[in-house]
Image (cartoon, rainbow, N blue to C red):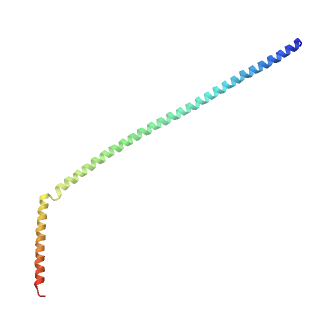
Amino acid sequence: MTTYQWVTLGLGALGFLITWTGMWFGAGRFVEQMRAEFKKHIGDELDKIIVKMEAMEARFDTDQKAQDHNFGEVGAAMRQYIADIEKKVREVEIYGRDNYVKIPDFEKAIDRMGETIKGAVTDLKEDMRRILRSPN
């Protein structure tokens, strides 16, 4: 082989080596750029998700405060309702105490009613005897 052939072969091998090295270098840069793009894209999406989560958390906090306030209002309304019922029951107790029959008065009325019934039964007995004795 002549020098010219060796130089041509060497240049071909060198060109082949430079081409493949350049391709590996280019592929590495391409992969690195893709990795950086994906990282950036994932970071952007993560930022969007975090912003949405923070907005949802703020809305949840607002809703929770409103619910706490409303439930506090329910408790206050229940306490007021119970107080009103207790007041009404007390009024009914006092009305019953003042307006209904007392036990001694009730016992007197029962005794009078008993005497009246006894008198009525006695009168009925006498009327029945008289009817049975009469010849009609």
Of 38 and 15, nearer the camera is: 15
Position in image of residue 113 (x %, y %): 13, 67
| Left or right: residue 92 compared with residue 5 | left
Which residue of the protein is positioned furthest toward the front in this rendering? Answer: 1
Q: Quadrant of residue 18?
A: top right
Identify the residue at horizontal 29%, vertical 47% (top origin): 82
Quadrant including the C terminus: bottom left
Near-viewer residue (103 or 91) = 103
Identify the residue at the far top of this view. Answer: 3
Look at the picture and state if 81 lies above or below 15. Answer: below
Q: Is 73 situated above or below 34?
A: below
Q: Residue at x 12, y 60 (%)?
A: 105
In the picture, residue 14 is in which quadrant? top right
Residue 79 quadrant = top left
Residue 131 falls left or right of residue 23? left
Please name the residue shown 61% across and 28% down the image: 40
Q: Which quadrant does the N terminus fall into? A: top right
